[in-house]
Amino acid sequence: MRVIGYTVRRLVEMIPVLVGITLVAFLFMQLLPGDPITILTGGKASPQTIAALRAEYGLNKPVYMQYLFFVRNALHGNLGTSILQQVPVAQLVLQRVGPTVFLLSYGTLIAVLLTVPLSILSAMRADRPIDHGIRIGGMVTFAMPSFWLGLLLILLFGLKLHWFPIAGWGEGFLGHLYYLFLPSLAIGLFLAPMLVQSLRSSLLEITEAEYIEAARAKGLKPTRIMVKHVLRNALIPTVTILGVNIGWLVGGTVVIETVFSIPGLGQLLIQSVLYRDYPTIIGLVIVFGFLVMVVNMLADLSYAAIDPRVELG
Amino acid sequence: MTVAADNTSDVERVLRRHSALRSIRRWPINLRIGTVILAIIVLLAVFAPVLTPHNPIVGNFQATLLPPSWAHPMGTDELGRDVWTRTLYAARTDLQLGLIMTYVPLAYGLMLGVIVGFLGGWFDRLLMRLVDIAIAFPFLVLIIVIVAILGPGIKSMYIAVFCVGWTMYCRLGRADMLVIREQEYLLAARALGFGSWRIIFRHALPNLLAASLVFSMADVVLNILLASSLSFLGMGVQPPTPEWGAIVAEGRNFMLQAWWISTLPGIAIIVTGLGFSLVGVGLASMLGRRYVQTL
């Protein structure tokens, strides 16, 4: 019940930010160079046709009316019609949101699977060669451009070894897991160093706590202490870091989707920007903003799941 | 008299040099290694015309897609341009992009954060809502949309980052200001009747700068990655200007025949990023645990 109340309150708090997002997105789009109707018709339509199309897309109304028109429609789940593809933006988003969310979740999962053992190893062997190795390795992968890593993964595991496909996102759950492995690995390798650094320092801090001393005094094994007592308490700052970096992560998927030709929201954004399909760009900016807010809320909610002492207030 | 003055200045100079050397010796190892890496990259960028006889823009159509050799240590691209030469010249572009895209927003973002943190009031609340909205957007998406409005190119990238990049420093500066505002030395400054500006710029800002500088090292890496990603997507630096991300994009279609085109610029980005990260971690450990770096 507490969780439901908190979720509702957070959703209400999202409204002003969401209005801000739509406003900023809409104002940006007003500044886009080039007339979308001229682009749509290739500059070959008669003035009458152009006028009719402008009326159809609401482009002949004052800017604030266009915005209010847009917000009213958005509240009804109508994000406008894509000028380029002639289908509703909401439909395009629904088609494309699956690969992006799958990629984000898969990438995060890989990052977590890499982070937990590496951080434990690094903290248990603090300031020894293996710790230095993990930290330097983290700095290297952090500075590695995701598009470059993606290309190298394609070259090695796709083109040379033929282990993984290099484009698309496959059919069915297992197909997605297989097709999106390389792109998710690229995302996971970018995210993991940030998480390792945070988890390592929290692990080291908590190792000095009295209750850990007590666990040691009871004669528990170091691995058990680390996994059962230290890790759970150290996870909260790591989840925060994950929440803070979700914006970067979503941005990263734009690049990775382009490299691996994944039909997700990022690829749609690049396509829409290139063709100045601005109803789609407005819709996408809002969807991306919303995605980041939802993930941040999930991060907040997960604190309570990780640590029952956390009060959701 | 003149001789004595000269002698004094010499002594001073020697002493100063000694203390500088001594303080460098006291630097943490990661700070020293990071500084050396960055110094080498800066030297390579500055002396690029001396280090390579080739032109970074003009190609030789008789020598396209050549593998690494003595004449071309990292081979040539599809237009017959030397990849090593282009990577060296690209260091100038990328370092400039990374530094300007970080430190210009740092300057006004931090100052704004410190001012609103000290003064509070309606402007503080309004600004923080604006920051909330800016942070709610995925950074790259926002930059892509702004660059799309302005058209691709270096100038657009700068404007886009200047519009958005200050928010993090504003938050950081404001949060730190809220903490130190209640500390005794600032209360004392207020009790002495100093004006707000004097307190902010003379007493508070110098104490808040270190945290932002440590954070900025990671930000330079992220901004170099951002600039190269935008160039890779065709929205940043335009050909034929050498830029690491753009060179990787150019080599993308030749991955199987000519792996060397895309490989070297990627390594250059990693080494530069490693240099900045090491300096950041070194600075953080030198300044104390308060300045934990976000990598």
Image (cartoon, rainbow, N blue to C red):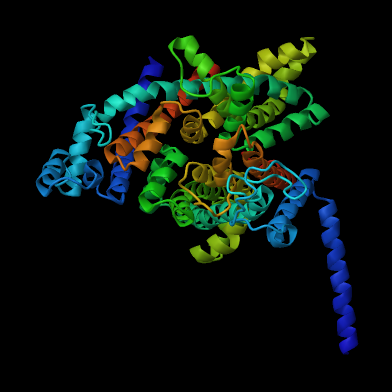
Residue that appears at 36% across and 41% down: A273
User: In the image, residue A286 lies at what x, y percent?
Assistant: 33, 35
Residue A231 visible at all: yes
Quarter of the C terminus of chain A within the rendering: top left
**Residue found 74% across the figure and 26% down from its top:** A122
Q: Is residue A33 left or right of residue A67?
A: right
Residue visible at 72% across and 23% down in the picture = A207
Between B87 and A181, the residue placed more toward the observer is B87
Q: Is residue B108 above or below residue A228?
A: below
A285 lies left or right of A49: right
| A139 up-or-down from B99: above or below | above
Location of residue A39 in the rendering, given as x and y in whole percent from the top left corner = 26, 45
Left or right of residue B64: residue B169 = left
View extreme (left): residue? A48
Q: Where B63 sits versus B45, above or below?
A: above
Q: Quadrant location of the N terminus of chain A?
A: top left
- Residue A172, picture quadrant: top left
> x%, y% of residue A119?
69, 24
Q: Looking at this view, is B210 or A310 the one in front?
A: B210
Query: Residue A166's x, y, as percent?
Result: 53, 23
Question: Extreme bottom residue here?
Answer: B1
| Image mark count | 0
Q: Nearer the viewer, residue A125 or A137?
A: A137
Residue drawn at point x = 33 percent, y = 38 percent: A281
**Camera sees residue A308:** no
